[in-house]
Image (spheres, helix red, strand yellow):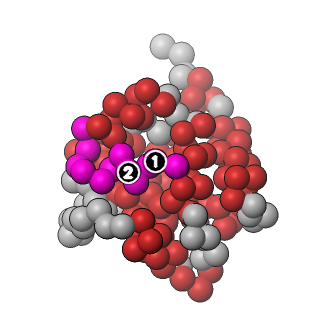
Amino acid sequence: MTMPGEYRRASEDFDSYLDDVRVDALIDSRNVVYTMTQGVFQTFRCRLDVADALRFADVLPPVLRAIFVSDWNPHDAKRSFDDRAAMTREVQSLRGDHNFAPDTAIRDVAMAVRKHVDVAAFDRVLKTLPDGAEEFWRP
């Protein structure tokens, strides 16, 4: 079996993702984009049970998949989906003193993620997740 292309191209694909967020969100710093992405993923992930979170992670490219599952304690209490403003504040609270995610962070990450996934597979998985998941990823 040969190595899947998604693994051979993982770094280049991640660089392309970072550039897409930077352009769409008008952010110069890749560090800001990384923290914003991590915050969006953690905010979404804590609203899923483990099986749902892993099915969602499976439709992400390798580096985004790794970010999605990193620093995860699956025993943390599951939260409910809230309005976008409240969840955006949650995104912005990750490393608060060093987090410069804009109020459009969830939308910005959602737009960029959709450029780097199989959208049909992504949407299929979202339809199987709890109420609020599809809305969360709607740009």
131, above or below 29, in the image:
above
Q: Residue at x 60, y 37 (%)?
A: 115
Question: Is 127 displayed left or right of 121 in the figure?
Answer: left
Task: Indicate the amino acid at tag 1.
Answer: Arg
Q: Which mark is residue 135?
A: 2
Could you say whether the residue bearing mark 2 is in a helix, strand or loop? helix
Residue 97 in the image, given as x and y percentages of width and height: 59, 86
Q: Residues within 10 Å of mark 2 (few under 14, many from 20)?
A: few
95 relative position to 50: left or right: right
Q: Position of residue 45 (x, y in %)?
A: 34, 57
Question: Label 1, on which residue?
Answer: 138
* Mark 2 touches mark 1? (CB < 8 Å): yes
Which residue range is magenta in the image?
128-139
Q: Residue at x 44, y 71 (%)?
A: 85
Residue positioned most to the right: 28
Foreground: 116 or 9? 116
